[in-house]
Image (cartoon, rainbow, N blue to C red):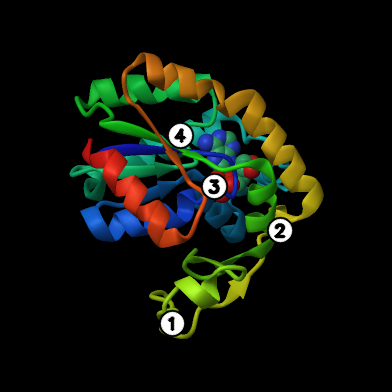
């Protein structure tokens, strides 16, 4: 199964990716996670990406595409993958098509996750991430929905939850603007290819997961 999750920041791509990883036993490939790891390691690529990320803008296509080419060349992606946060604009979508055509592994589905603007802002305000493994939880909903968090697979300790630096109000507004301007056109792009499946991604995690499952089994 080769899937793209398409949705604004806060639409639940990370959370649903985590569920799909368990369900299909295929890796989540999140360009945001890969970039944050590069920033944390202080690599040259990370230094180049950091300013754009802090400002809520897109990182240059060449940087992201190099990272994706390398990641999709790794053996664990042979049986499929979930792309989370990539592609983010038409140039990236076209480059991805070219790359997948070369390896004879076209996409199976693009899942559009629809969440209204006010709900996106609310979710982002409550979002916390484990600084060691990237596990995502939402403080606003976790008490009722998420089982007792497992230990961090990287450290063996309880997850160390932090708020992402770009989850502040000003940066979020810019990220949502960039989504509308650069990423939303991908909805039509993938609809024309017959790959688009749209779901209502509001509601609790279990309800949305059921919709994801149904949309992917169509
Ligand atoms: P995310 O975790 O997907 O919300 O991404 C966090 C930030 O990383 C974004 O606001 C961008 O600055 C950068 N980023 C992630 N994925 C991409 C991408 N495909 N293209 C360009 N920039 C990206």
Instruction: Say which residue appears at 33% left-offset and 53% top-offset.
Output: 210
Structural distance between the alpha carbons of marks 1 and 3: 23 Å
Above-or-below relation of 7 to 119: above
* Residue 88, percent from left and from top: 53, 31
Structural distance between the alpha carbons of marks 4 and 1: 37 Å
Q: Which residue is mark 2?
A: 165
Q: Are marks 4 and 1 in contact (CB under 8 Å)?
A: no
The foreground one among 185 and 103 is 185
Which numbered tag is attached to residue 66? 4
Instruction: Say which residue appears at 30% left-offset and 39% top-offset.
Output: 215
Q: Please indicate whether residue 136 sits to the left or right of residue 126 in the image.
A: left
- Badge 3 or badge 2: first in the primary sequence: 3
Q: Is residue 107 visible?
A: yes
Q: Are marks 2 and 4 in contact (CB under 8 Å)?
A: no
Q: Are marks 1 and 3 in contact (CB under 8 Å)?
A: no
Q: Disc 3 or disc 4, which is closer to the eye? A: 3
Structural distance between the alpha carbons of marks 3 and 2: 18 Å
The foreground one among 173 and 63 is 173
Q: Secondary structure at mark 2?
A: helix
Instruction: Say which residue appears at 43% left-offset and 77% top-offset.
Output: 152
Q: Which residue is mark 1?
A: 148
- Badge 2 or badge 4: first in the primary sequence: 4
Q: Which residue is mark 3?
A: 11
- Badge 4 or badge 1: first in the primary sequence: 4
* Residue 162, percent from left and from top: 64, 70
């Amino acid at each position: 199964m080769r899937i793209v999750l398409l949705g604004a920041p806060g639409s639940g791509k990370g959370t649903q990716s985590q569920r799909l990883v368990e369900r299909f036993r295929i890796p989540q490939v999140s360009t945001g996670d890969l970039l944050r790891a590069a920033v944390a390691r202080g690599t040259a690529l990370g230094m180049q990406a950091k300013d754009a990320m802090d400002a809520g803008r897109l990182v240059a296509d060449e940087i992201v595409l190099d990272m994706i080419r390398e990641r999709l060349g790794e053996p664990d992606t042979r049986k499929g993958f979930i792309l989370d946060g990539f592609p983010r604009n038409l140039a990236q979508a076209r480059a991805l098509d070219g790359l997948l055509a070369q390896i004879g592994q076209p996409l199976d589905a693009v899942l559009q996750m629809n969440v209204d603007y006010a709900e996106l802002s609310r979710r982002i305000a409550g979002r916390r991430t484990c600084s060691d493994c990237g596990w995502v939880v939402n403080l606003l909903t976790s008490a009722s929905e998420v089982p007792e968090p497992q230990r961090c697979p990287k450290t063996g300790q309880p997850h160390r939850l932090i708020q992402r630096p770009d989850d502040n109000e000003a940066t979020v507004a810019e990220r949502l603007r960039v989504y509308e301007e650069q990423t939303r056109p991908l909805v039509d792009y993938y609809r024309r290819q017959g790959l688009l499946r749209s779901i209502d991604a509001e509601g609790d995690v279990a309800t949305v997961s059921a919709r994801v499952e149904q949309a992917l089994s169509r």
